[in-house]
Image (tube, rainbow, N blue to C red):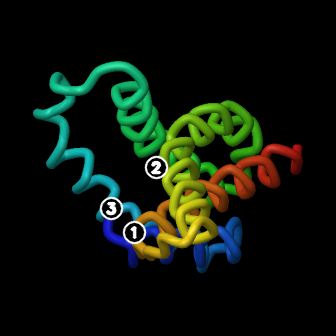
């Protein structure tokens, strides 16, 4: 997903589950759905952890649509509880990439990749939001 879509999700996590956050997350779903549709034909080339991460991304895309509908109706805590492990699996690679970027900077090889940083922020924000939502029940 583009870096700006990840940052839009991060803003949505701050204002969710209020209606404005649900609308913002609905708009931010468009690049996520497009990413699924554009990559579904290449999944057969993946193996191992990469395949699991992409499958978690696909499942989370579908579950986010359902969760947004439930949040609009004032529910969603039960589904959020089930989404936490998938969110952690989906974001593990992004957080690992950010850790590699930070470690490289500490060892004297500074490089900044906005996509790695925004994806890791999204991954951490997603897990935090889902944990916070799951506790509301």
Residue matched to label 1: 115
The secondary structure type at the circle numbered 2 is helix
In the shown orientation, is residue 49 left or right of residue 1? right
Residue 5 placement (x, y as % from top left): 40, 72
- As helix, strand or loop, the secondary structure at mark 1 comes to helix
The residue at the point 29 percent across, 21 percent down is: 47
Q: Can residue 14 be seen?
A: yes
Residue 39 percent location from the top left of the image: 18, 43
Residue ID at (74%, 36%): 81
Q: Callout 3 environment at 10 Å: few (<14), some (14 to 19), or many (20+)? A: some
- Which quadrant: the N terminus? bottom left
Closer to us: 41 or 61: 41
As drawn, the residue found furthest toward the front would be 108
Q: Marks 1 and 2, how far apart in space?
A: 23 Å
Give yes or no for contact between labels 2 and 3 (Cβ–Cβ under 8 Å): no
- In front: 38, or 47? 47
In the rendered image, residue 132, in percent from the top left (x then y), is placed at 82, 54
Q: Residue at x 57, y 52 (%)?
A: 95
Q: Any mark on residue 65, and which?
A: 2
Rendered view: 81 above or below 4: above
Looking at the picture, how far across and down is residue 61, in whole percent?
A: 42, 45
Circle number at residue 1: 3
How far apart marks 2 and 3 lie (CA) works out to 17 Å
Q: Is residue 28 above or below residue 123?
A: below
């Amino acid at each position: 997903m583009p870096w700006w879509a990840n940052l839009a999700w991060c803003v949505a996590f701050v204002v969710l589950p209020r209606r404005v956050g649900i609308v913002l997350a609905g708009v931010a779903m468009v690049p996520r759905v497009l990413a699924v549709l554009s990559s579904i034909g290449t999944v057969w080339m993946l193996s191992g952890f990469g395949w699991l991460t992409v499958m978690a991304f696909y499942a989370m895309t579908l579950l986010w649509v359902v969760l947004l509908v439930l949040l609009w109706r004032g529910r969603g805590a039960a589904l959020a509880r089930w989404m936490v492990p998938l969110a952690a699996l989906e974001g593990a690679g992004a957080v690992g990439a950010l850790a590699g970027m930070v470690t490289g900077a500490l060892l004297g090889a500074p490089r900044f990749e906005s996509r790695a940083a925004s994806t890791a922020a999204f991954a951490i924000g997603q897990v935090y939001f889902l944990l916070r939502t799951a506790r509301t029940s």
